[in-house]
Image: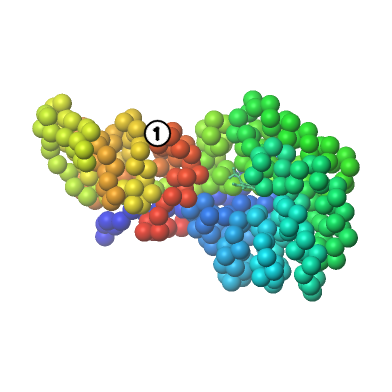
Amino acid sequence: MTNWQPQARIDLHALQHNLTQVRQRAPGRQIIAVIKADAYGHGLLPVAQALRDQVNMFAVARLHEAVTLREADITTDLLLLEGVNDREELSLATHLNLQLVVHQASQITLLRHTQLRQPVLCWLKVNTGMHRLGLAPAEVDAAIQQLCRCENSQLVGLMTHLANADDPTDASVQQQLNQMVTLGRRHDLPQTIANSAGILHWPASHADWVRPGLMLYGAAPHSAGTISTCRLQPVMTLTAPLLAIRQVQAGDRVGYNGIWQAHQTRRIGVVGIGYGDGYPRNISGDAYVLINQHPARIVGRISMDMLSIDLTDIPAHIGDRTVLWGNGLPTDQVAIWAQTLPYTLFTGVSARVSRHYQ
Ligand SMILES: Cc1ncc(COP(=O)(O)O)c(C=O)c1O
């Protein structure tokens, strides 16, 4: 039976392949797989189940993501990247046996003034240049002292996040790394620095633990190469059915606002996916989809549930499936057409697109 819905096929073998690439790039390092935001749109639980015995720890951003994992009996060590903000969150986090990022003084105060049954494992986050979360390097010595004196916390390591690792030539990355080297001379603690771009392009950032997200899902960080140069495989392949085929004549305009006009007779296909499913509305005029392995150019505006393609000279029938990104059409390429990043494409795939695991 033909399936008339858009689907995201999730290839868990490709996920394993990409994890192997992490190991090859950062040999011997502990691995924290970043599975926040529904594993970047790939499905939190299926991804966690596939990786649970292969990585040393998972990382999520929000407490409710941790709750979902623990309720599904995922007992793997789990790092809460934004830490906790009040007693209630701290109590839930300890109940869930989470490791916490501590990135500001109020979190240390919270730890010192809450009664816990056992110490919670903490990673002290340092702001080395991202200016998002983290204590200033000058505040680190005092914070370490406080955490070591606090009976509610056990300091596991130091952490920072790189702002520009996706540019292999950016001098600020080395400056960030230098600050961690300086801290490492003073404090004999494990460090975690590298995201995917760090793993791929900055070996000096590998430290003790690496934190891959994007590369696990088979996309290359912006400007750092393509998935084939990074030897990654796409995990998600987004497909949708061809719903209708029509002939348009010279002068006919297709779709909202008529931004595309036929200059001669063309065969137009209507594909059942649109921005309501997460396909970017602002895609450029060069963009294409794959149908029966042929590239077919997108014409006219993307609608909420549909988009149109030029099928002239392409063998295709109603019910055939088109590939929007994934196998044969890297997400990195689609991200360029949409002036965005694979991160937003993956996380933007809406709930009405069913995920299928293989
Ligand atoms: C603190 C932290 N570490 C690691 C990652 C993983 O980054 P990437 O997906 O670029 O590998 C993220 C993702 O945003 C993050 O916020």
Q: Is any part of residue 315 visible from this angle?
A: no
* Residue positioned 31% across, 31% down in the render: 285
Residue type pointed to by label 1: Trp
In-front residue for pair 237/153: 153
Residue 240 locus on image (x, y percent):
32, 49
Residue 6 shows in the view: yes
Left or right position of 190 against 310: right
Would residue 255 be found to the left or right of residue 240 on screen?
Answer: left
- Observer-nearest of 210 and 180: 180
The secondary element bearing badge 1 is classed as: helix
Q: Residues within 10 Å of mark 1 (few under 14, many from 20)?
A: some
Which residue is rendered at x = 70% and y = 64% of the image? 98
How is colour applied across the structure in the image? rainbow
Residue 116, given in percent of the width and then of the height, sits at 78, 72
Q: How many marks?
A: 1
Compared with residue 63, is residue 317 higher up or lower down, i.e. above or below?
above
Disc 1 under 8 Å from ligand 1? The reply is no
- Quarter of the rendering occupied by the N terminus: bottom left
Instruction: Using the image as rendered, state which of residue 262 and residue 13 is in the foreground.
Output: 262
Residue for badge 1: 337
Q: Residue at x 58, y 54 (%)?
A: 35
Counting from the top left corner in percent of width and height, residue 176 is at: 73, 35
> Viewer-proximal residue, 151 or 18?
151
Against 228, residue 354 (above or below) is: below
Res 287 quadrant in image: top left
Q: Residue 155 placed where, x, y %?
A: 81, 56
Viewed as shown, does residue 198 lie left or right of 156? left
Q: Residue at x 19, y 36 (%)?
A: 258
> Is 44 positioned to the left or the right of 202 in the image?
left
